[in-house]
Each structure stands twice: as structure tokens, then as C-alpha cells.
Amino acid sequence: MAADFDTLADHLREHGHKLTQPRRAILKTLVAASKPLSPAEIQARGQAFCADLGLVTVYRTLEIMADVGIVRPVHVVDGCHGYVLATPGHTHHVICERCNVVVEIAGCELGGFLERVAQRTGYTITGHWLEISGICADCQQHDDTQ
Amino acid sequence: MAADFDTLADHLREHGHKLTQPRRAILKTLVAASKPLSPAEIQARGQAFCADLGLVTVYRTLEIMADVGIVRPVHVVDGCHGYVLATPGHTHHVICERCNVVVEIAGCELGGFLERVAQRTGYTITGHWLEISGICADCQQHDDTQ
DNA sequence: GTCTTAAATGAAAGTCTTTTTCAGTTGCAG
DNA sequence: CTGCAACTGAAAAAGACTTTCATTTAAGAC
Ligand SMILES: [Mn+2]
Ligand SMILES: [Mn+2]
Ligand SMILES: [Zn+2]
Ligand SMILES: [Zn+2]
């Protein structure tokens, strides 16, 4: 979670995007979140920081932030996509099936597997998307006491 | 690919569901597909087998088939959910960025990696979703001759 | 086979999500 | 400061999915 506001804001600017009030609000909202948020949730929470934050702006900003690599869309069982902050670079996420809490995984150890896939299929591999689901320590605890 | 029509149809009946013409059409469509299909795609392709197959019926039928365990909703990066027949084992797909042709990868070799993730995060890992993108042999060929 | 009935169907309307359009506003380089 | 492209929110449009309802159909009983 090297996700501090200023680093992420700089990252946006370095890619030639303006740092506007709505964008600050969205970034603050994501920094404060511990689980993937839908665009509507981001708007609702973000209005604490920018009173008239529009939903259209949330959609547009998430697209930019995903392009720039500071947020990532993740699959959420009900309602399709949620968005979480991502460390720029290549990482993966583990999502709790019960409470949706997300942990970011730094290293990607798929290299060997992908090479074998390339050989077996004849494809040149250009990218991959991996999401892991599980049950977080807290939710396991609650199961035990039930 | 133990996905033959009759076995799947029986499976539906055994769970107390009628085997109607629209449902036959949807099942045939899924049996013939090599990639996840959206409800709209299933309707379009299914009309070859049942001319006035309605989209509402596709949604309702997919829900039933998922409950009964013969189809599985999968996350598709653009457009959220697609549906595939539930293959018994666990497989992944490699998709060509140019022509969208899909190849299924039989083995899943993520076990070791997932174990390390479990230890590092404290999560019990219950599932994962992996999509690999690349360029198929044919499309590489065409690049060469351009 | 015919009858009966609950399950299933498609059209239409309704709800929710996401995108497009556009006139006004704002961040920021000069 | 100033100027101007980037950015904004409201409104409308487009899409995705669900609910409602009158009609049809599959499948078991006779
Ligand atoms: Mn999804
Ligand atoms: Mn990776
Ligand atoms: Zn949890
Ligand atoms: Zn190809």
C-alpha cells in the first residue's frame, strides 16, 4: 500500500493530466477505501471532498487513472466492476469473497508458466490479467465463532 | 470438453426443469461456442435454432443453468459477464488480441504461487481468474508479410 | 392419443448503468 | 494576469438487465 495521495497525484500530472478538484476528491476517496468501489460509491463518498462531484466525471477519471496505471478495475461478484488503487507497475489483487477487502500482491511469478503457454500454443504472449479470490483472516475468524 | 448436449439436457431435467425449445437452442449455442458469450450473443446465435428466442429467456435460462451447475459466468474485461459451459476441470484461455481466436489451456500451474499468496496474506484462497492475451500464429504471419 | 396444469415464454414497460453531447468553467503554461 | 485547451456537470441517449403479464408449451395423468 505505497498509495499516498501525493505520489499518485504526481503520477497523474506526469502523464499530462490536470489535477482538478474532482480528481483530487476521487483520489482521496480511493486512498481511504479498503475495498473495490463502484463508480456510484466513489461519487457518493467523493462528495465529502468535492460537493458537486458528478458521476460522469467519476467514469471519465477512472478511465484516465486506469490508463495511467494508478487504479485497476477488478471483478466484483455482484455489480461487475469495482475500482481499487494500484501501485504503478504490474501487480495482482486478492479479494475477500465475504467482505471484499483487497490486498495487493507485489510479485508476479507467472513467467515460467506463460513461456510454456507460448510454446504450447504458438501465441506470442503480450499480457495477462490475474485476480485471486479468497477469504480474509477476519472473515475466517468469524466463521469459527459461528 | 465433456460437454455433450444430451448429458447437459438430462442434467436440467433431473433438477426439475422443462426442456423447452428455447432452452435447447441456448444449450446448442453454448456447446458450439469456443469463447464466453454475452447474453446478447447467445440470443443472436441461438436464433439459428429457435427463430424467436427472446433475450429475457436467455437471461432466465442462464440463471437456471448456472444454479444447476452446467454453465459458469466468467468475467470478461469489456462488458462484464460472459457465460461458458462449465468444464469439469479448471482451465484458462489465451485470446488473440488481433482476431480474438481463443485457445484453451488445460493445466493450471498456479498452485505454488497461490500457496505463497495464502501465506503472505493470511487469506484462504478459493479461486482465481486468469486471462492471457497474445498474438496467434496466424496473426504473427500476417505481420511479417506486411 | 387427449386433458390438465404448472412452468415457461416473449412483448412491453420499467429500472439501472454507462456514454455522448454541449455550453460553461478551471487549471496551468506562458 | 491572460488565454486556451482540458475539464466539468446537466441533460439526453444508449445499453444492460429486470419485472409484469397475457399467452403458450412441456410433461405427467388418464
Ligand atoms: Mn465482471
Ligand atoms: Mn502477473
Ligand atoms: Zn473478508
Ligand atoms: Zn489472431
Image: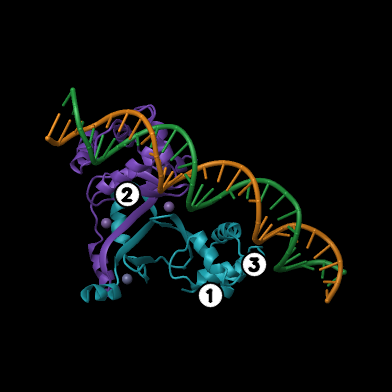
Chain colours: A purple, B cyan, C orange, D green
Query: Is any atom of residue A35 visible in this view?
Result: no
Per the image, the residue denoted by label 3 is B13
Q: How crowded is mark 1: few (under 14 residues within 10 Å), some or many (20 or more)?
A: few
Residue B93 in the image: state x and y as whole percent: 37, 66
Badge 1: chain ID: B
- Residue D17 or B44: which is nearer the viewer? B44
- In which quadrant of the rendered view does residue B137 lie? bottom left
**N-term-proximal mark, 1 vs 3:** 1
- In which quadrant of the rendered view does residue D25 lie? bottom right
Query: Are discs 3 and 2 less than 8 Å apart at CB?
Result: no
Per the image, the residue denoted by label 2 is A93
Residue B109 in the image: state x and y as whole percent: 31, 65
Query: Is any atom of residue A116 visible in this view?
Result: yes
In the displayed structure, would residue B17 be above or below residue B49? above
Amino acid type assigned to the residue bearing label 3 in the image: Arg
Q: How far is mark 1 from mark 3, CA to CA?
A: 15 Å
Amino acid type assigned to the residue bearing label 2 in the image: His
Does the Cβ of the disc 1 residue fall within 8 Å of ligand 4?
Answer: no
- Residue C11 or A62: which is nearer the viewer? C11
Residue A77 in the image: state x and y as whole percent: 45, 49
Per the image, the residue denoted by label 1 is B4
Question: Of helix, strand and loop, which one carries label 3?
Answer: helix
Mark 1 and mark 3, same subunit? yes
Q: How crowded is mark 2: few (under 14 residues within 10 Å), some or many (20 or more)?
A: some
Residue B52 in the image: state x and y as whole percent: 62, 65
Badge 3: chain ID: B
Query: Are discs 2 and 1 less than 8 Å apart at CB?
Result: no
Residue at x-position 24% and y-position 68%:
A115
